[in-house]
Image (tube, helix red, strand yellow):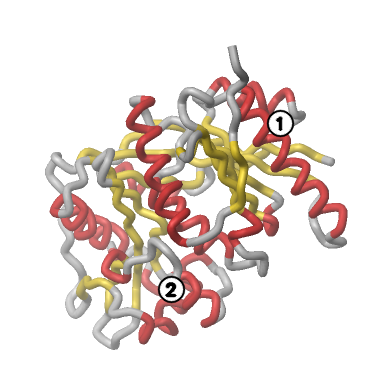
Amino acid sequence: MSEIVFQARMYTSNEDMARIQDANARWAQIAGSSLGYIHSGDIAHRLGNGMRHTTLPLTELVRIFEQDGEIVGWLVLYPHWCSFEVQAHPHYHGGDLYRRMVDWVEEWLIAYIQRTPDAEKALYWDVFQEDEVTEQIAAEHGYTLSDKGYRYITRSLSDPLPDSTLPEGFYIRPTLGVQEVDRLIEVHSGAFNSTWTREQYLKVMHGPGYDAEHEMLVVGPDGRFAAFCIYWLDGINKTALFEPVGTHKDFHRQGMGRALMAATMQRMRAEGAETAIVWHELSNPASTGLYTAMGFLPKYTIREMKRSL
């Protein structure tokens, strides 16, 4: 029996973004489960928003593996966090190709850490706790649980949706585009205590997969943005992902996030989605309370695994 040959290459263009998004959606469909697979929208989010701290291009950070021209696996490196993702067709998940991808990504990151004086001497890998195959591979490579983790929760969009009433003078709409970049930065930073430059946010807005019509806002009477979310559609599996969701600290406990998510779920449903998805940190009780009240139920747990060097 002849050996299966895989062709490895680096990411080359925005066309590759669409191809790996389609691949992940199809793999989840084939597997009959999203377990272990990044939502197609989250791929765009991670390769856009998630790369704002690095100057390296995606052509150096994303590697694609093909068989007879079809994508069967891919990986991405996050140098800023010394972290990575490995994704593969269900037929190859946990097999030789998958293990070779893990070996390759670790080799690259270790070399990066060795030549970067201020890099942490550790590797990080977010693993679905229910994915026993990947958990076993991580353990074999010396990874152990860190103190961070996430809950993957879902909600049927066929169930009655919560009320989206806001305080007087506030209303919900999508962003109008790049002309609102300064106010978008303000609400993002105020929600997550994060730091953005105009250049970074504009890069995300001009990046592949971003759609201004899907960045939803709560706008106050004075024009300030009180809350925001971005939603991403997977037409193959009829799911829609919230990523990210945030309320500016000046507007906490006023129902902004709840109303915004309710209105956004109406849009998701109108665009053909049947299930809404969101991740939240296990250590964030406020998020847990909000999402539970909105009818989301736990599906998976993702744990951060750490390998000290």
- Judging by the rendered image, the residue that carries numbered circle 2 is 206
Which is more foreground, mark 2 or mark 1?
2
- Residue 288 seen in the current view: no
Q: Which mark is residue 144?
A: 1
Vertical relation: 10 (above or below) 173: above
Q: Foreground residue, 201 or 303?
A: 201
Vertical relation: 298 (above or below) 234: above
Q: Quadrant of residue 208?
A: bottom left
Residue kind at label 1, given as amino acid type: Thr
Residue at the spot 33% in from the left edge and 31% down from the top edge = 29
Measured as percent of width and height from the top left, residue 295 is found at: 25, 41
Residue at the spot 83% in from the left edge and 62% down from the top edge = 118
| Residue furthest to the front | 2
Measured as percent of width and height from the top left, residue 24 is found at: 42, 40
Q: Foreground residue, 41 or 104?
A: 104
Quick check: 278 left or right of 103?
left
Residue at the spot 18% in from the left edge and 57% down from the top edge = 267
- Residue 242 seen in the current view: yes
Q: Foreground residue, 115 or 145?
A: 115
Measured as percent of width and height from the top left, residue 245 is found at: 39, 59
Check the picture and name the quadrant holding the C terminus.
Answer: top right
Residue kind at label 2, given as amino acid type: His
Vertical relation: 56 (above or below) 282: below
Q: Secondary structure at mark 2?
A: loop
| Residue furthest to the top | 1
